[in-house]
Image (tube, rainbow, N blue to C red):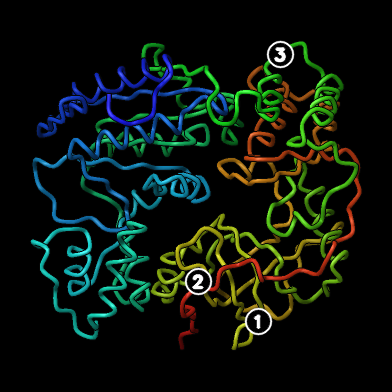
Amino acid sequence: MTGALTLSPDQADAHDRIADALRGMGVDIDAAVLLPPTEGKSSVLAVMGKAGSGKTMLLAQLVTALKEAGVEIVSGDYEGKRRKDRRTLAILAPTNKAASVLRLRGVQATTIHRILYTPVYDPQYEKLADWLNGEGKGERPEVPGMTEAAMDRALQFFKSHASIPAALAAAGLRGSDFITGWKRREEPLDIGFIDESSMLEDRQFDDLREIFSTLVLFGDPAQLAPVGQSGTMVFERLPAPAQLQLSRIHRQEADSPILDLAHALADPALSFEDFERMVQEAARRDERVVWAERVESDLMARSPVLVWRNATRIRLITAFRAAHGAPETELLPGEPLICDGIELPLKHRKKRIDLEARGLIKGAQVIYLGAGRKSGFSRLHVLGAEEPQLSAASIVKIEKPDDEEPFIPFAATMGAAFIHGAAVTIHKAQGSQWSDVQVFAPDLYAAARMGRMEAGIPLWKRLAYVAITRAETRLLWVVRNRLSRPTGPLGVEDLRVGAAPLALEAED
């Protein structure tokens, strides 16, 4: 078995089942033998397990084994010359947030959308991309306007991050310099690993089955199912032999109180009141669990409070801004935002490419750095991006209780749209991870009192499970509708200063 890490018995069994399926598709990861793909054959498997069961660890092990066998990784950023006999692997997630979690763990993941829609490169920069990708016999190409120093920067960056667009950006190029557009993928792909597949919609699953001959889904059946799917997930409808179960807990220390609480929710007899007593007892024993009488406003600047109800989200954001003395019509440097999409007409296609190439896509977490040089522009820091700092025309929606969603008056008429990120719903938090997580318990109590069910499980338990498992290090269970005073003003000193910022300019 490939890899330095030792797999548990259930992981090893899943590994062997997947290896057998891959062998049947012409990819032998044990013998490192690759055969050309066979037309008409297909295979779908699902690795299912709760938080901490080792799904991501197994995925990473399989990726390593496939790479060692000679399988090429397809990222969606750039694809080199196609060979009939090549075998490929794409590691995908339904959202950019979920993909970024994998990338932070060293797995070259991308989004499903980025695989379905591929970039079209300008021919002169395509040569540069081939060189960075290890093609073209290693000969450094000649690209008009590109200095040797710029190409060295691009190569060094690519060796560290394995991203063609980010490497070219590090060399001083904008996305619209080398990407001329996007097209719906026509050519089929080979092997696809789908992480966070509990978030996978039926339509996305159908699209993926059309593209990939081999699919392996990695998902948690205890998560929240996509809206409109009656509480069921795509992997739950696969035949039983295709469902591989993981049960042993691996993620955190064996005595992790956070995971203990998450898995306690599986008890059908557990009431909300009993669960809160468990949280309180865990907080007495271990500093990784905190019984909090109020929301910590300091944490909200970088880690949102997780809530169920949208009204709660708006109230907490309003309280957070009031605590920091934020004016109604302005943002303070250091306020957190979440990208809600790019609102640009078709003629501004190049500007959209520039922003997306820098990681500013829907769902991206952003910190406001200050006003841009032009009216309506904002300087922003995109959390988790390789080159995080940019300037963009911004439309910021600050929602208020009992009011319609007003725009900040100085916002641009079009550009990148944002909502405030000091609090988010648990549904939107799926796929994300934070070191410290605050869960607003009064919302979950309201869900428990309503008695709502999802796929035979009380909704409050599913909500609590998702919220708790977003915490990597510390869980704060907030039991009162109160907000602590900030210990200091908002700031941006903790953010890494990036290279020369990208400016989104208005077109005539």
**Front residue (pair 49, 408):** 49
Q: CA distance from mark 3 to mark 1?
A: 51 Å
Neighbor class of circle 2 (other Cα within 10 Å; few <14, some 14-19, many 20+) is some
Type of the residue with mark 1: Ala
User: Where residue 501 appears, x then y in whole percent?
Assistant: 49, 79
> In this rendering, would 167 be left or right of 68?
right
Q: Residue at x 33, y 67 (%)?
A: 167
Q: Earlier in the sequence, mark 3 or mark 2?
A: 3
Q: Which residue is mark 2?
A: 344
Q: Earlier in the sequence, mark 3 or mark 1?
A: 3
User: Where residue 149 appears, x then y in whole percent?
Assistant: 27, 80
Q: Quadrant of the N terminus?
A: top left
Closer mark to the observer between disc 3 and disc 2: 3
Neighbor class of circle 3 (other Cα within 10 Å; few <14, some 14-19, many 20+) is few
Type of the residue with mark 2: Leu
Q: Which residue is mark 1?
A: 371
Q: CA distance from mark 3 to mark 2?
A: 49 Å
Decide: is 57 above or below 143.
above
